[in-house]
Structures are given as C-alpha cells and as structure tokens.
Amino acid sequence: MKIRVFDNRHDAGIYVAAVAESVIEAKVQPVLGLATGASPISFYDALVNLHRCGLDLSNVVTINLDEYIGLSIEHEQSYHCFMRQNLFDHTNLRSENTYLPNGMADDLAFACEQYDEVIRRHPIDLQILGIGVNGHIGFNEPDDLLLSKTHIVRLRQETVESNARFFEHIDDVPKEAITVGVQAILQADQIVLMAFGAQKADIIAKAVLGSVRTDVPASILQLHRHVTLVLDRESASKLPMAF
Ligand code: F6R
C-alpha cells in the first residue's frame, strides 16, 4: 500500500487527477470508479481543470459507487446531482458513459443486478474511494459479513449522522442506499482512497495497521495489490511513520 501525505486537499486533488490522467491516456475506453462526499471534491476540481487544459474525457466511462434510495436524481443531495455539479457539467464526459445506481427504481433488486452487469461490461481501471468514519467504503457498512455484489444497504446510524452535514435536518437523510459490493472495488486495477481531517485519523490507522475485518470494511484494501492512500497530515496523524 502506497501512502502519500499532503499539506492540503488541494495539492492532494492535483496528485489524484494526475494519476487519473495517466490511466485515461493509457486506454481507448478508460473506466473510472467514482465516489461522492467531501473527500474527492479537490480531485474533481483538478480533473475539471485538466480538462480545461486539454484532457479529453469523451471516451471515459464513469461508474459511481452508490446512490441514496428514494431521492430523485434532481434532488440536490442525490449523488446524481453531486456528480453533475462537481464533474459532469464541466467536462466533455458523455452522459451515456456515466453510470450511477438508480435509487428510484421500482424494482431495486433488479436495478442492483443491472448495475453489476454494467461493471462486468466495463472493468474499472481506477477506483476512487473515500472512507466513512466507521470504515465503510462505498456504503459497505461494518457488519458480520461484506457483500460482494451490488446491494441495498440500511445505513448505520453513524453514517446518517455524518451525512447529516449535507442536509437541512438529520431526518432528511435517507436511511437506505444502493452500493456496489466489495467485489467491484477489489476487482479495480488500481485504487486511490482519499481521506482528510483529524476525524479520519483513527479509522485510517485501523484500516491500514489492523487486521482485515468485516467490521472495518476498508481494511479489505490490504488485500489489493495496487492501493494508494491520499491523506493530509491530520488523517495520517495516527500512522507511525515520520512524514
Ligand atoms: C460516497 C461513498 C462514501 C464516502 C464516505 C466518506 O460515494 O461511497 O463511502 O466516500 O462516506 O465521505 P466524506 O468524503 O464526505 O467524508
């Protein structure tokens, strides 16, 4: 596992965008697995900037990790909306090449199956991840077992509380989501996990230094051969390394 510790999110985002650029330029139809939330925003800013500087994204396929159940794609806290605002609307990504789970599907189980089919057809070259304060990746929450396929998940109370910062009221935070399973994440060729701030320090230390355990889902990344953790000094502060 490679660890890079930056002074700030801005510099970290530029680094991740450079990683993405090298993946994009190496493939005819590169596939990026994408996350939402606060952590990848500096990456999206830098990628949009690279696009303005000439990086063509018209052949790039994007596959997002998750979406809330019950929020329309127009809802400002839906992950569809997040992706439009932070990336899609500012690049030449083609809408037919961008995939997010359908949290409004009548048949959610079928929507999950179809999403796995999308991932099967488009193996992920670079997976971008954030990490929940409880160690979740995507919305694979701590549990007795981790599911390999795309599935419906009931969000843990700590996730609802953490995501309440994006909503007017905690009761507005959806309690369920669709998430890809750990198989889609682990089958990515390369993974970059972004985590910033002191509130992520404990879970980063557990995920990196502790045993691989289903109650710390991110610890499963120890099993992947090409993972880079992109941190700031605060989130890296519990790692016993001299930076
Ligand atoms: C979002 C996702 C989540 C977030 C995680 C961290 O698509 O899959 O795992 O990455 O909850 O969120 P932030 O970055 O807001 O701290």
Image (cartoon, helix red, strand yellow):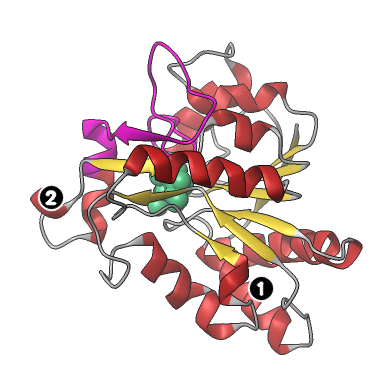
Left or right for 161, reference 34: left
* Secondary element at tag 1: helix
Residue for point 73% across, 28% down:
224
Left or right for 46, reference 35: right
Q: Position of residue 233 (x, y in %)?
A: 58, 47
Using the rendered image of the protein, determine whether residue 197 is visible from the camera's viewpoint.
no
Rendering quarter of residue 10: bottom right
The extreme right residue here reads: 26
Rendering quarter of residue 209: top right
Residue at mark 2 to residue at mark 1: CA–CA distance: 32 Å
Rendering quarter of residue 24: bottom right
Question: Where does the C terminus fall, quadrant-wise?
Answer: top right
Q: Position of residue 223 (x, y in %)?
A: 71, 21
Q: Is 16 placed above or below 84 here?
A: above
Bin the neighbour count of mark 1 within 10 Å (Cα to Cα): few under 14, some 14-19, many 20 and up. many
In this rendered view, identify the residue nearer to me: 19 or 61: 61
Q: Position of residue 59 (x, y in %)?
A: 75, 72
Point out the stretch of residues depicted in magenta.
133-161
Using the rendered image of the protein, determine whether residue 75 is visible from the camera's viewpoint.
yes
Q: Which residue is mark 1?
A: 47
Does 209 lie within the magenta span?
A: no
Q: Position of residue 168 (x, y in %)?
A: 13, 63
Q: Is 232 placed above or below 184 here?
A: below
Q: Which residue is mark 2?
A: 170
Which secondary structure class fits the magenta region best? loop
In this rendered view, identify the residue nearer to me: 169 or 69: 69
Residue for point 82% across, 59% down:
23
